[in-house]
Image (cartoon, rainbow, N blue to C red):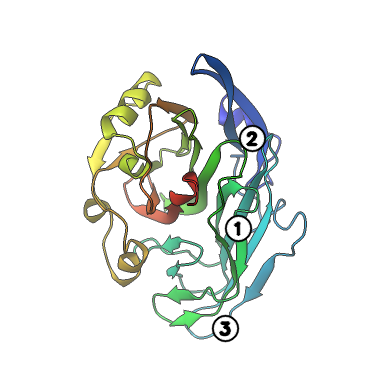
Amino acid sequence: MQSVGQFGEDVSNIIVAIEGIRYRGFIVNAAFRLFPMTLLALTGFPALACNLNSFDSVSPSAEINQTSPTDKTHFTWGSDVDPSRNSYNGTKAQHFIENLHNRNLSLHWPKAGLLIPFDNPLVSSKCIDTTDFGNEGAFVIDFDAPINTSNDGTKGAVAYVRVQQDASVAGPKISGTQIRATFTSDGESRSAITWLVAFFFPEDQVLQLDLYSGESGTSMAFRPESFGIGIEQVAGQLSEFGIENIQTTSIQELVKLNDLASQAFQGVENNNFIQATVQEQVSLNFSGVTEIPTGETSVLLFSPQGNLIAAKRLATWPLIDAN
């Protein structure tokens, strides 16, 4: 399997892009079906924070603004929706925060589903960006998408948010998210990335999960039961890729639930998460999936030392046909 790192060598200035498709054959009901495998550019951050080459590539125009500077916070926020460059009619909604203040920044952006935790804030001049993946027409603009900061109240913002689609959407149902951020190790700033993208084929009762947690020793955590599959099923397939030391845990064990974190994980089932280090993207396939719970879950990104870097809300209901 081509390593994701090799794939990203020539696109180091692209923060997030699905640049190509790998296909994996899978026998479904005695028929051969091709599953798209998500590939995203991985190399280091560009020299300038938030140099989003793929951001605002087509209309509609991105929503970007700066908050009014105070003695506590000053940051740029942005949100955009663009087509995904792959073989299905996919759409991606991107969000970013760039800290313009000399103080660290912690926040919860509910409509974008983003948590920058108090214990690992965004330092001055650094950026965090996230991407949500969905089917065509999966996102609409919301002009009331405030951002809650840890020490400076609420700031007005706009965000592209996910909406339910009807059963006429062709192909797999898609819901996924990616986080790109930085963390400090040995006094140096390092890049971190994770993603989870789910493809569900209701007629075939097949679910595919594409997972990656970066090559720098960072790890990811998510809840398999939120996708209608068990911990043992995921752990078994991860072990086939040589991924061991898979931990079963809970939100309370993973995160310090201060005010911001409590907001971010409100309404999320907090037990039976798994934490694993996935240094090359893997594509897991599960057959016989008849029901996916309606709701939302979270994907978490951790430093090699086990500290939460960021968390992202992920909806599972787009994988289910609207009634």
Look at the picture and state if 286 lies above or below 307: above
- Give the Cα separation between the discs numbered 2 and 1: 27 Å
| Image point (47%, 64%), residue name | 122
- Give the Cα separation between the discs numbered 2 and 3: 36 Å
Amino acid at dot 2? Gly
Residue 1 location (% of width, % of height)? 55, 19
Q: Nearer the viewer, mark 2 or mark 1?
A: 1
Quarter holding residue 32: top right
| Image point (49%, 85%), residue name | 71
Can residue 228 be seen in the rendering of this structure?
yes
* Residue occupied by mark 1: 139
Q: Earlier in the sequence, mark 2 or mark 3?
A: 2
- Give the Cα separation between the discs numbered 1 and 3: 30 Å
Residue found at the far right of this picture: 58
Amino acid at dot 1? Phe
| Image point (47%, 36%), residue name | 212
Query: Dot 3, crowdedness within 10 Å: few (<14), some or many (≥20)?
Result: few
Residue 227 location (% of width, % of height)? 38, 41
Quarter holding residue 243: top left
* Residue occupied by mark 3: 69
* Residue occupied by mark 2: 8
Residue 299 location (% of width, % of height)? 40, 49
Look at the picture and state if 145 lies above or below 225: below
Residue 323 location (% of width, % of height)? 48, 52
Quarter holding residue 88: top right
Q: Earlier in the sequence, mark 1 or mark 3?
A: 3
| Image point (58%, 60%), residue name | 95
Amino acid at dot 3? Pro
Find numbered disc 2 in the image and state the secondary structure of the residue it sits on: loop
Query: Dot 1, crowdedness within 10 Å: few (<14), some or many (≥20)?
Result: many
Q: Earlier in the sequence, mark 2 or mark 1?
A: 2
Q: Nearer the viewer, residue 206 or 148?
A: 206
